């Protein structure tokens, strides 16, 4: 009983969850290096798994955890902006390819949102669940905002976004081999459109060029999805309801 009371008191301290988040990620880096850089054991995956186990074991709510984790969440913005550095290094190539890149990311976003909505309808998911999953392929802050505006559940969206990123990063190599995609900038751009931050992390493992194009794709996909998701999802739902 004394231990439980002590934990209940400590759990209300945001510093505890901030420290646990940082320690879990540090442990993830160690595991990732020891594994020989296996994508399935990336620091992000390990950190999320460890933190989920702690939350379930202690019966801690997400809201309590986020009081400390919000400080890390805030850094998503600066981290995204920092992707401009490798983009600047590839500015000449980007200037030549702006038209096909813009068309590609727009088509990718439309397909991503439409396919998610249609699959949700096929499997008889609730409207709330479908609109929560619709922006799954963009970075977490944007996806949560889009989901909330459409009447979805932001926390559920965040989980789906993480799952999408992990899946995309894991299957990317196999998909590229099957489709015989060999150019780094195409690989990177595809990862950015389909798997946001996790895909970009995987792209940087391919090359700096792939990472730069992935960062660009992730940013463009977030902006475009924020506009097209509310335009595509509700009409599709209305059509098949």
Image (tube, rainbow, N blue to C red):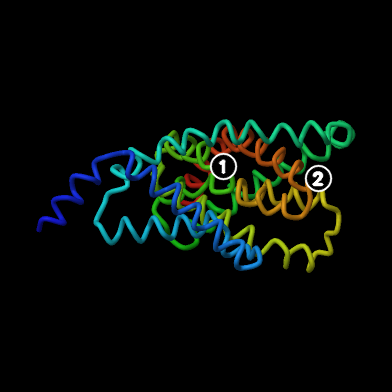
Q: Indicate the position of residue 28 as horizontal and vertical percent values.
A: 52, 58
Q: Indicate the position of residue 177 as horizontal and vertical percent values.
A: 79, 67
How dense is the environment of label 2, judged by Cα within 10 Å: few (below 14), some, or many (20 and up)? many
77 over 178 or under it: above or below: above
Per the image, the residue denoted by label 2 is: 209
Marks 2, 1: nearer the viewer = 2
Q: Indicate the position of residue 50 as horizontal and vertical percent values.
A: 41, 59
Residue at the image position 38 percent from the left and 49 percent from the top: 20
Residue at the image position 47 percent from the left and 44 percent from the top: 238
Q: Nearer the viewer, residue 181 or 208?
A: 208
Q: Secondary structure at mark 1?
A: loop
Left or right side of 9 for 183: right
- Residue 106: quarter of image: top right
Question: Which quadrant would the N terminus be assigned to in this image?
Answer: bottom left
Disc marking residue 139: 1
Q: Nearer the viewer, residue 175 or 188?
A: 188
């Amino acid at each position: 009983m004394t231990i439980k009371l002590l934990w209940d008191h400590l759990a209300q301290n945001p510093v505890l969850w901030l420290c646990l988040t940082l320690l879990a990620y540090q442990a993830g880096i160690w595991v990732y290096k020891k594994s020989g850089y296996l994508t399935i054991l990336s620091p992000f995956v390990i950190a999320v798994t460890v933190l989920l186990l702690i939350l379930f074991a202690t019966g801690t709510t997400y809201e309590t955890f986020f009081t400390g984790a919000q400080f890390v969440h805030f850094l998503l913005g600066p981290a995204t902006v920092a992707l401009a550095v490798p983009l600047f290094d590839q500015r000449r190539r980007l200037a030549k390819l702006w038209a096909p890149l813009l068309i590609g990311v727009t088509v990718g976003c439309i397909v991503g949102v439409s396919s998610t909505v249609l699959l949700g309808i096929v499997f008889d998911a609730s409207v709330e669940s479908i609109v929560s999953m619709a922006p799954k392929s963009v970075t977490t802050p944007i996806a949560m905002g889009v989901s909330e505006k459409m009447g979805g559940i932001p926390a559920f969206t965040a989980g789906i976004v993480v799952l999408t990123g992990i899946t995309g990063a894991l299957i990317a190599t196999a998909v590229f081999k099957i489709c015989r995609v060999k150019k780094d900038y195409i690989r990177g751009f595809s990862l950015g459109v389909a798997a946001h931050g996790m895909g970009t992390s995987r792209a940087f493992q391919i090359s700096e060029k792939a990472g730069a194009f992935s960062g660009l794709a992730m940013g463009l996909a977030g902006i475009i999805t924020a506009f097209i998701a509310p335009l595509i999802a509700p009409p599709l739902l209305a059509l098949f309801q």
